[in-house]
Amino acid sequence: MRILIADDNAQRYVRLLQALSGIGIQRNQIDIVGCANAARDELQATRYDLFLLDILLPLWPEGEPDVQHSLDLLLELQEGADHQKPGRILGITVDLSLARETVTKLEEWTWTVVQYSESSDEWINRIQNCVRYIVTEGGPAAASNDQASVDLAIVCALATPELEEILKLPWNWSSPRPINDLVFVHDGTCLSDGRPIRVCATSVARMGMVSTALVSAAVISLLQPRLIVMCGICAGVRGKAKIGDVLFADPAWDFQSGKRVREKGKAKFAMAPHQLHPPEVIRSHIEQIRVDTLALGRMSTAFGSDAPGVSSIVIGPVASGSAVLADGQVVEEIKAQHRELVGVEMEIYGLYAAAHAACRPQPLPFALKGVCDFADSNKSDDSQQYAAYASANVLRILMERFGSRLLA
């Protein structure tokens, strides 16, 4: 195992070096350089298993740090042939509030981006988990790990605010660990009737059904969850749901499935929706929570004065599509596919499809999404935090109250 660290502040890695020593990575296996050109020299001479790159790096030791120097080095590693490409690359930064374009490039060109902190060991734990994965490479040693399977897998489309609210649940969450080259999960535990339930949570790199289906399939294959759920935010249908309500998707389908035809000289979309349903056993337990207005009221009150009111649980059809909607007329057109439509979003059908197509034992899929807007011209982000909170906490009530029964 060989590790290269490129950072002009080597002192910040003292604690990391100590932590890596604790899992068998010795100091002589780690090289530290302070500028981009020194990193180039090392990468030409040595093939590293892991390259930890500060995203604000000087070109020369005496120079000023600049994100462009790090981006140039990453581009050379991606497209050039002058260096020995490392097995994995981790970006590290003190400040994640860089330009969105820069962060997107870093996420595309690195395994993941880690935020350094002087006051927390979260970044150290995350790097340790990555090193453990590289050492085992997902082989027999990893498969024998106690965390190789889970009871409940949670998939979110967005790291913020969706996964963020999941990780606020009091379920003893760990630092993220990789389960393959693309997917990182947080492990946690919740209790139901005194029984510990193993939980993992992750978010998808890109919104949409395809990315959701791919991540869900990987989680199902590698962790073999018995339950898999999508939590997060969605658009509601006026008159069927209000802001802050939580939708239980039954059924879900791709509202763009079909073909374009010409009929009497006019273009027409011939719909061919394929509807997938969650298991009846989960729906029946959601019904029990839906009528518990006291528990839902406490949940809304706990959020604080910014809550839009007391949330309700709405059970009904939710359509998935590949585009963000801000045109109320499109929602009216989707209603033609199911007159009881309660919501529209971009991912649920992908998760349901991955679960239904999985090899046995198949997980039981379901989805809980909080309404943050109505997919019209009045669309805003004001209610996203509460909608994500409500979704996460309805899941908490379900698992803590009925989890042991659902897993019996």
Image (spheres, helix red, strand yellow):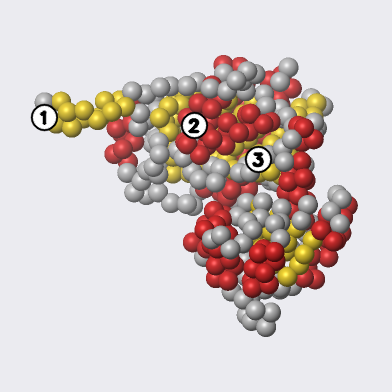
Farthest-out residue, left = 265
Q: Is residue 304 left or right of residue 123?
A: left
Tell me if mark 1 has few (under 14), some (14-19) or many (20+) residues whose alpha carbon lies within 10 angstroms of its own: few
Element under disc 2? helix
Mark 3 / mark 1, whichever is N-terminal: 3
Residue 216 lies, in percent from the top left, at: 58, 33
Residues marked 3 and 1 touching at CB (< 8 Å): no
Mark 2 / mark 3, whichever is N-terminal: 3
Residues marked 2 and 1 touching at CB (< 8 Å): no
Residue drawn at x 66%, y 52% is 88
Residue drawn at x 72%, y 41% is 137
Q: Which residue is mark 3?
A: 180
Quadrant where the C terminus lies?
top right
- Above or below residue 157? Residue 294 is above
Element under disc 1? loop
Element under disc 3? loop
Query: For residue 265, which numbered disc appears in the image?
Result: 1
Residue 258 falls in which quadrant of the image?
top left
Q: Nearer the viewer, mark 3 or mark 1?
A: 3
The kind of residue on which mark 2 rests is: Gly
Q: Which residue is mark 2?
A: 350
Residue 317 falls in which quadrant of the image?
top left
Residue 248 lies, in percent from the top left, at: 53, 28
